[in-house]
Image: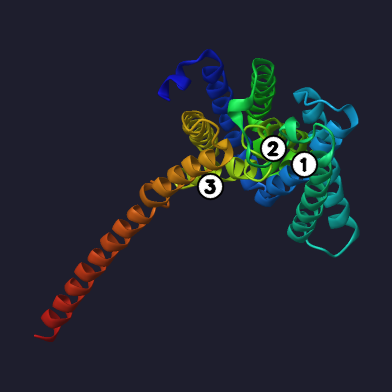
Amino acid sequence: MWSALLTSNTQWVLVSTMVLGIAAGAIGCLAYWKKQSLMSDSLAHASLPGVVIAYLLFAEKDLYILIAGAAVSALIGAVFIQWIRQTTRITEDTAMGMILSVFYGLGIMLLTIANRSAGGNQAGLDSFIYGQAAAMVRSDVWTMLILALVSILIVVIGFKEWKLYLFDPDFAKGIGLSLKGMNILYTVALVTTIVIGIQAVGVILIAALIIIPSVSARYWTQSFRLMIILSALFGGVAGAAGTAISVVGNGWPTGPFIVICASALFIISLVFGKQKGILVRHLQFKKRQKLAKIQNSNTTMEMQGVSK
């Protein structure tokens, strides 16, 4: 059972999901500060119809074709969210929820049709729901690895621009930084990270790999740079650990185990986090309570001294 981890293909898959987790953690910090955590969930679900339509059109499970279909479908979902927000009184969160539900429902409907078609059951499209990293071949791994590295480089190279775009958009606009261009780049990077992760983690759970590491990192630091590093680290550890458990389990879905590993890191951060952890806040509260008692005691003694 454990020997499965020592095979060459498994080790490549482990590396690719670890890099995917790093990319998801880094991009997740942008989504966190842009207050669009639900956006990644919406676009992940919106990618499912594209996967199935690409399969129905070309009748083969080629990862390049399926990723292209997922990317187009997710980008259409992003355009619809923007259009609803700009042309109606519907709030952005509601628009995201609507697109998530409509596109996912359409995806499930198309998936049912595809599975009933000749050879549909053998296509393995169901693995895109919960993820199946063990089913990836060498070419799939290389594709995921290269695109994940591109997403990481987008965050690293444009770190200063991202910082201005997220925290001081007026100043960024004043020095000539295109907010529209940054928004498009953010959406493209987010969609890229989502679509390369859907085979390993699945359309339902890839959003968790983007959101949970960034929230966990927030419990440890106030620095944006350190938050990105920690979030990438948490995502990478969750991706590799979840995939290892999935491989050892011989066919277990990868996505749930990656999310469980990310959740375990979140619980550790929630309790022991240096900045906002429950334990630290409890100790700080006790310290303030003790100081207040000492101050009250001193004040009482001073008043008694004056009265005497």
* 291, above or below 67, in the image: below
Query: Can you give x and y, in whole percent of width and height, for residue 140 in the image?
Result: 68, 21
Identify the amino acid type marked 3.
Val
Residue in the foreground of this view, choosing between 113 and 80: 113
Q: How far is disc 2 from disc 3 in space, using C-alphas?
A: 25 Å
Q: Which mark is residue 48?
A: 1
Query: Can you give x and y, in whole percent of width and height, for residue 171 in the image?
Result: 72, 42
- List the single residue furthest toward the left: 308
Looking at the image, can residue 242 be seen? yes
* 94, above or below 118, in the image: below
Q: Which mark is residue 128?
A: 2
Helix, strand, or loop for circle 2? Answer: helix
Q: Which mark is residue 35?
A: none
Question: Measuring 49% from the left and 44% from the top, which residue is drawn there?
Answer: 260
Q: How far is disc 1 from disc 3 in space, using C-alphas?
A: 26 Å
Q: Which residue is mark 3?
A: 215
Proximity of marks 2 and 1: CB atoms separated by less than 8 Å: yes
Instruction: Locate residue 54 relative to residue 100 in the image: left or right.
Output: right
Identify the amino acid type marked 1.
Leu
For the image, the number of numbered tags is 3
Q: Write down the quadrant of residue 134 in the picture.
A: top right
Question: Measuring 79% from the left and 43% from the top, which residue is drawn there?
Answer: 111
Q: Earlier in the sequence, mark 2 or mark 1?
A: 1
Identify the amino acid type marked 2.
Phe
Q: Earlier in the sequence, mark 2 or mark 3?
A: 2
Helix, strand, or loop for circle 1? Answer: helix
* 9, above or below 231, in the image: above
